[in-house]
Image (tube, rainbow, N blue to C red):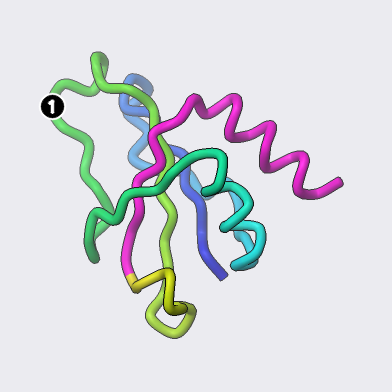
Amino acid sequence: MPNLYFCQPHAQNQGMLRAILSINECEAVVRQYPAIYIGEDFPRLGNDGKAAKDFAVLRFHPEETTATWRPGYYRVDSDLNKLNESLLALSR
């Protein structure tokens, strides 16, 4: 199951696990907040953490990939509060 992490550079938060999603839940979130593949390594925060924007990261393990999702990490540039609201709506 894909993992979703919230990264908040201004708080020096490298990445906090926020949710474990099913493929269907992940696809519902990505329809609202597009994800861009960034590779097989978790992104590192730069030295300019206070100026950097918050973002989310999706992780797909190799055994969880589909025709749409390859193994690795995807960056989701979105307001984390809005993304969190979408996650809460999934559980209703």
Residue 74, position as x, y percentages in the image: 35, 54
Q: Viewer-proximal residue, 66 or 64?
A: 66
Residue 4, position as x, y percentages in the image: 51, 52
Name which quarter of the figure residue 53 lies in: top left
On the rendered structure, is 58 left or right of 53? right
- In what quadrant of the picture does the N terminus appear? bottom right
Residue 22, position as x, y percentages in the image: 64, 66
Residue found at the very far bottom of the displayed protein: 63
On the rendered structure, is 20 left or right of 50? right
Residue found at the very far top of the displayed protein: 51
Element type where label 1 sits in the image? loop
Q: Amino acid at mark 1?
A: Asn
* Residue drawn at (35%, 46%) of the image: 75
Q: Viewer-proximal residue, 44 or 85?
A: 85
On the rendered structure, is 3 left or right of 43? right
Classify 48 as above or below 32.
above
* Residue drawn at (43%, 70%) of the image: 68
Classify 83 as above or below 10.
below
Q: Which residue is mark 1?
A: 47
| Residue 71 falls within the magenta-colored stretch | no
Residue found at the very far right of the displayed protein: 92
* Residue drawn at (13%, 27%) of the image: 47
On the rendered structure, is 13 left or right of 39? right
Residue 56, position as x, y percentages in the image: 43, 40
Q: Viewer-proximal residue, 24 or 7?
A: 24
Question: What stretch of residues is rendered in magenta?
Answer: 72-92
* Residue drawn at (67%, 37%) of the image: 86
Name which quarter of the figure residue 12 lies in: top left
Classify 84 as above or below 2.
above
| Residue 88 falls within the magenta-colored stretch | yes
Name which quarter of the figure residue 87 lies in: top right
